[in-house]
Amino acid sequence: MEPLIITAGKIPTTLLSASRNIVVIEEEEIRESPASSIEDLLKYISGVSINQRGPEGVQSDVSVRGGSFEQTLILVDGIRMNNPQTAHHNLDLPVQLEDIDRIEILKGPAARLYGGGAYAGVINIITRKEEPKKLKLKALIGNYRLLDGSFSLSQPLGLSYNTLSFCGKHSDGYRHNTDFDIWNVFFNSVGSYRELKGNIYFGYNNKDFGASYFYSDVYPNQREHTKTTFLKGSIDFKKTNMNFYWRLHKDDYLLNYEDPGFYRNYHTTHSYGSVLQSSFSSVSGVTTGGLEIGGDKIESTNLGDHSRMKARFFFEHGLPEIHKIDVVLGSSLCYYSDWGWYFSPGIDIGYSFSKRTYLYAAIEKGLRIPSYTELYLSSPVNIGNRDLIPESALSFETGIRAARGSILTNISAFIRNQKNTIDWLRESEIEPWGAENAGEVTVKGLDINFTFKSIARMYKKIPIPVIKFGYTFLNLDRDGSSLQSKYLLGYPEHKFTLSADYDLASNLKQVWKARYEILPDSEKYLILDTGISFEVKNSEIFLDVTNLFNTEYTQAGWIPMPGRWIKAGIRIKVY
């Protein structure tokens, strides 16, 4: 069955007929993966780069197709989760893996759909809804005194389906000052009456962790404590949808926990808004339009107190198919009280070469306004710039998607021309990083993906249900500058990914996931993860091993990553 894709456009479509490059991580893959966080799942997606500062979901920067972590939009159920303080906190999400139905990754810009920030890619995390009555428990232990436990309760009540989950995680850390405690609470309620449907979502995430060298290669005793609260309500009636959301994020940061008075920052940010969207059909096609109104606010001991109002008008129109040609066009008109108006048009064109082969092309203009950190930060190692202006980009992509028997192929080429690109630069290691508009940058690339399904049914001697292979090539050309870049060159030029499921015996399964990355500075590394699970009655016993080869490598510029990490646990379905 082809999954219904909701992230690629305001008009839902199937995966095979989407005129964009879309990857879907489905529920079964999430459950069987050795991943212990959302960023672990994203590591094995071609075209997606994860720069971890801390493992197990402590903190990671996610970027798509050579963009910076500030240029990727994170959504939960279609609602923006980007932090206006800094995108370092974009993955402070109040949702655990057990709560996720699937993850849709849109590679490429989507400003016409989602406004500013949807610059290089979009990641939409879609939670479970309308679950039957069940109670699930999980317990896990691992190296570095890792403890992880959770429960999830789903209980229908009257006309509503309700899910409540809680998880806690602790580790002493894999090196100096990398210990962490993470807590997460999730509640989701969906109710319906005739054609009216409502949803209430509440989430809370609490992280207290050692941040050794996280933001500077000079200070090993950094420490951070973040708290995220998220509340969303939605109402659906026929083809009209209205969402209300509020995200509160608190950040307590120490540059040196042994001397708290030396440099300490408190940041509190609010992001809030409402989105109204409606669609209708006519002889000229399907039209969807809407309005989003909201704002951001920050109260900070370092960045100061600032706020902005935001408004966005958007529309998308899908023309009727003519001679096997699909055309979807749209635009977004965004207003920021501190920047003014910005217009982001785009068009997708698809051609059904045959019943199972689809050619597509897309062109779109993207934009991103500076974060509050980029504008106002003042620290011994990083200095913001109040004179920054928004960055923009014009992106073009063309590709082919084909399904033949059990093989799904997706090949695409893309180019993104960026103007006023924002980066952190410095002349030498003894100087602080400074935020600057780094000029024009051109990103070119190639994205290849193959999925082989149902292999065991075709070749009974090969007990492998699914094999996935991905490859991405990226080339970044920037204005001739001798300044050191903090983030522009942090992407892999070549990234190979391979994953496979293997049935060892009845009820015994093994999952392999490998990635090989070559960075612009010629650093290269191979990481192999594996997981073995055994199901018996209502329980599943599992053993996960990450970085099986104990590879030494760094991410986020200079931070050493963990070596081999062994974890074992059990999942129980009580009822």
Image (spheres, helix red, strand yellow):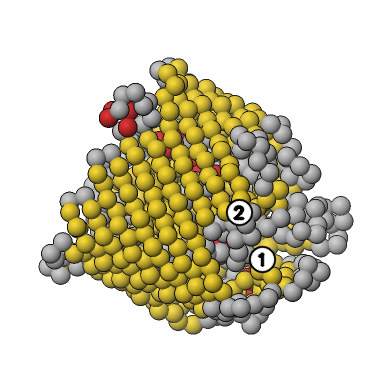
Q: Residue 424 carries which label?
A: none
Residue 160: x and y in percent read 35, 40
Q: Classify 10 Å Cα crowding around label 2: few (below 14), some (14-19), many (20 and above).
A: many
Q: Is mark 1 on a helix, strand or loop?
A: loop
Residue behind mark 1: 486
* Residue positioned 15% across, 70% down in the render: 284
- Real-space CA distance between mark 2 and mark 1, rounded to the nearest whole angstrom: 12 Å
- On screen, residue 1 versus residue 438, left or right, reads left
Q: What element carries label 2?
A: strand
Tell me the kind of residue under disc 1: Lys
Q: Can residue 185 be seen in this view?
A: no
Residue behind mark 2: 51
The quadrant in which the C terminus is found is: top left
* Residue positioned 53% across, 68% down in the render: 476
Residue 190: x and y in percent read 37, 44
Residue 281: x and y in percent read 18, 64
